[in-house]
Amino acid sequence: MKFTYYFDELELIKGYAVMAAGEVDVDYNIAKAEPDVGIFEPWITDIDITSIVINPTNQTAKYNISQDHWLYKLIHDALIDSDDLLQACEEDAAYEADI
């Protein structure tokens, strides 16, 4: 499954006021329930961020960050560790299931 996730005031370094805003393209999979091992609901797995675009403060144009840019890893890791991204994946999966 794929969707675009928008973030604002993402804390890049825990405990420091180093923030970013922008959007990322996210891929994820949905694993099936496995009642025989105690997993009764489908769950999100394999979350992958495929592109990052940040919003600069002094321009109107957005900036697409390449995967080898030093900011890419900071933003990627902050989002992957975020419960907000997991929740967004769950909401997207629920929305797609309703369509």
Image (cartoon, grey):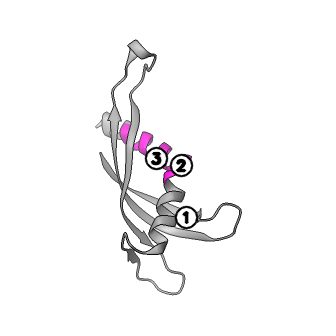
- Residue depicted at x 49% and y 50%: 85
Q: Is residue 12 above or below residue 40?
A: below
In the rendered image, residue 21 lying in the magenta stretch gets the answer: no
* SS state under label 2: helix
Residue identified by numbered label 3: 88
The segment highlighted magenta reads 80-93
User: What is the CA distance from the residue labelled 3 to the residue labelled 2?
Assistant: 6 Å
Residue drawn at point x = 54 percent, y = 49 percent: 84
Which sits in the foreground, 37 or 60?
37
Q: Amino acid at mark 3?
A: Ala
Earlier-in-chain disc, 2 versus 1: 1
Q: Name the outermost residue toward the right.
A: 15
- Secondary structure beneath dot 3 equals helix
Q: Pointer 1: what residue?
A: 8
**Residue 51 percent location from the top left of the image:** 35, 64
Position of the N terminus by quadrant: top left
- In the picture, measured across the screen, residue 73 lies left or right of residue 42, that is right
Residue density around tag 1, few if under 14, some if 14–19, many if 20 or more, within 10 Å? few
Q: Is residue 35 above or below residue 80?
A: above
Which residue: 49% across, 52% down?
Answer: 80
Viewer-proximal residue among 31 and 95: 31
Against 96, residue 40 (above or below) is above
Residue 74: where, in percent of width, then height?
52, 66
* Whether label 3 touches label 2, CB < 8 Å: yes
Mark 3 vs mark 1: which is more N-terminal? 1
Count the labels in the image.
3
Identified by mark 1, the residue type is: Asp
